[in-house]
Amino acid sequence: MIITCDRVVDLAPGFVLGALDAGEMDAVREHMSTCSKSHPELREMGGILPYLGASLEPVEPPRHLRAAVMAAALEDLRSRMPAAPVQTAPQASPSPTVLEPAQAAPVVSLARVRAARSRRVVTWLTRVAAAAVIVSLGGYAVAVQADLNSAHKSQDAIKVYDDAVGQRGARSAVLAPEIGQRGAGNAVLLQSGHVVVYLSGLAPTTGDQVYMVWSSADGGPITKDGWITVDDQGSNSLQIDNVSAVDSLWLMVCLEPNRNVTAPTGAIIVTGIIWVYPPASPTS
Amino acid sequence: MRQVAAGEIGGLETLYDRYHAVAYALALRITTETGLAEDVVQDSFLGLWRNATRYAEDKGSVKGWLLAIVRHRAIDSTRRRRNGVAIGDETDELLPAALTLPDIWPEVAGRLDAQQIRTALAKLPAAQRDAIELAYYDGLTQREIATRTDAPLGTVKSRMRLGLSSLRRELMGIGDGQGPA
């Protein structure tokens, strides 16, 4: 539909409010894409809209929403980092993960974002629900120990985790492997602020390689929490001290070339989230 | 916003801490459902995070851009819920082109608080205010508003035009009268 400048003026209020029929909306857009005039009426009326939104009395959302937003952003950030293939030999040149501006925020399909987020929410819910069910049955420690015992040989490492997960008020999470990666883990956050991470099924570290644990409490900055090496049995545990998380603790384990890295640079092996404050309504 | 565009979580935290309550208020007003509103706010901040490089300072304030995203997604989510369509099928279009138009009076608007804007809205004749709010908050077209209010389509168009023009004049008058922010 071809329309004149006068017609655009006529349609301006409905256009800025998105209240025209689809054909009229398209016609205005088409006109504006070719018209040499500036059509100030669109700017004048369109400029009001943000203040309509801002006229509402602010409403504080549930506090878990902040953590959920930041966790989703971190997950998105993580998804942009290169995932190296499983290696048993030292990495000659670990993949850098410093984000170039163009790489940092690509134009992507929001449908894909929503799908990924929905999957994450489902995954988190599944984990939280699984943990809740186990706790309610009163067999949490036994179940975890049985599972771990059957899967791994490093009894010392298991015992460290097992002792932690049986404590009152402990919150745990499964650390799930990234696609194409070898390994798995569990993590438990204690009321004392200690976090015990148990990792298993990992490829042995060689040379200066370490499995580094990175975390983000409540969607905050990513911090470097500690590292482990593993032998042929592929398992080990790690304790992190002084963790303060109100809503959630996001954990990521990367295979780093050495213990001195200050930001995640290596392949992401496993990730998971410990929910401290269960979402009231983590919608899909 | 540059921090967000560079992939720095700290920048997103700053924006969230600054605008989460007004974003949630708008999402809640449109969706009328807390769960859906949370979903919209999370999606909106994530959309802002992932598309920050598309933001241009000459297209208006970050707050305005965010609220436009929230409104667009809230209306879209509400329509999908109403029509029984699963959320997740949308295109990557973030917001209607019109809503990214430059804000030509940021100096004035920057002095306004929510109460003053509400006061200006309250001064509009009820029919004009209703026409604007039905379009802005409920996502109705002019034709749908005409049906809902039992008014001729031309009348609805006139009310919308007069309402927006009056509101703009009123807001600019308030802003001008306050001196530097």
Image (tube, rainbow, N blue to C red):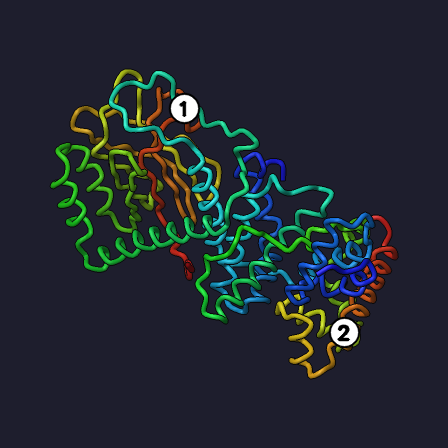
Image quarter of residue A88: top left
**Residue B110 drawn at (x, y percent):** 76, 51
Which residue is at a point 13% across and 45% down the rendered structure image? A146
Which residue does the numbered mark 1 point to in the structure image?
A: A95
Which residue is at a point 31% across and 44% down the rendered structure image? A190
Same chain for mark 2 and mark 1? The answer is no
Relative to B98, residue A220 above or below: above
Q: On residue B122, which mark appears?
A: none
Residue type indicated by callout 2:
Gln
**Residue A106 drawn at (x, y percent):** 53, 39
- Crowding at mark 1 (Cα within 10 Å: few <14, some 14-19, many 20+): some
On what subunit does the disc labeled 2 rest? B
Front residue of A57 and A103: A103
Q: On residue B128, which mark appears?
A: 2
Residue sitting farthest toward the front: A2
Q: Is residue B181 visible?
A: no
Q: Secondary structure at mark 1?
A: loop
Relative to B16, residue B89 above or below: below
**Residue A187 drawn at (x, y percent):** 29, 41
Q: Is residue A66 visible?
A: yes
Residue A151 relative to residue A121: left or right: left
Residue type indicated by callout 1:
Ser
Q: Secondary structure at mark 2?
A: helix
Q: CA distance from mark 2 to mark 1?
A: 59 Å
Residue A33 relative to residue B16: left or right: right
**Residue A138 drawn at (x, y percent):** 19, 57
Residue A200 relative to residue B155: left or right: left
Question: Looking at the figure, which quarter contains the N terminus of chain A?
Answer: bottom right
Front residue of A200 and B169: B169
Relative to A178, residue A63 above or below: below
- Crowding at mark 2 (Cα within 10 Å: few <14, some 14-19, many 20+): many
